[in-house]
Image: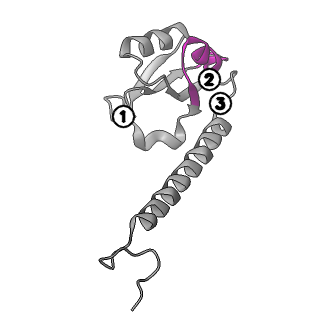
């Protein structure tokens, strides 16, 4: 009796099957990441916005760098998040989002969709 296509001598799926599955998985993950990057860029705030924002600093940026950038932009820290490079910040001065980018932030978003990521503080955020 002949072996099934894609199966090895033992009757289990062969190497070609595993490579095909791995390739499909990598293609799905790459597509998902591309869509998430597009969605993140589309959700980013304009440079003139102010108020409470969620800000992404470069991966590996120190706390000191994030705090100094926040201060240079004229804002204050409201809360941290589960990620060390993402902070919830506030300023009522127009143009805050643009100043944060100029000070080193990668992305600046409205904070409302990210409230579940924040670490509770004494301020209740």
- 10 relative to 104, above or below: below
Residue 27 belongs to the span the image colors magenta: no
Q: Residue at x 57, y 28 (%)?
A: 107
Query: Which residue is labeled 1 in the image?
Result: 124
Can you say whether 88 is above or below 61 in the image? below
Residue tagged 3: 45
- Which quadrant is the C terminus positioned in? top left
Give residue 49's position: percent from left, percent from top.
66, 25
User: What residue lies at 57% left-to-right and 17% top-to-bottom?
Assistant: 100
Residue lying furthest front? 1
Which mark's residue is nearer the viewer, 1 or 2?
2
Classify 22 as above or below 47: below
The stretch of residues the image draws in magenta is 92-108
Q: Quadrant of residue 118?
A: top left
Residue 11 quadrant: bottom left
Considering every residue shown, the one lying at the far bottom of the view is 1
Which image quadrant is residue 44 in?
top right
Asked if labels 2 and 1 touch by Cβ distance under 8 angstroms, the answer is no
* 3D distance between C-alphas at marks 1 and 2: 20 Å
The residue that label 2 is drawn on is 50
**What percent of the width, then of the height, locates residue 21?**
46, 63
């Amino acid at each position: 009796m002949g072996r099934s296509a894609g199966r090895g001598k033992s009757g289990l799926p062969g190497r070609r099957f595993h490579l095909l599955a791995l390739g499909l998985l990598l293609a799905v993950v790459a597509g998902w990441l591309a869509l998430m990057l597009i969605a993140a860029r589309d959700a980013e705030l304009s440079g003139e916005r102010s108020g409470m924002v969620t800000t992404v600093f470069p991966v590996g940026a120190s706390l000191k760098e994030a705090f100094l950038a926040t201060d240079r932009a004229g804002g204050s820290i409201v809360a941290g998040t589960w990620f060390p490079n993402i902070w919830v910040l506030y300023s009522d001065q127009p143009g805050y989002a643009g100043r944060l980018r100029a000070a080193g932030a990668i992305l600046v978003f409205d904070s409302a969709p990210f409230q579940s990521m924040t670490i509770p503080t004494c301020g209740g955020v």
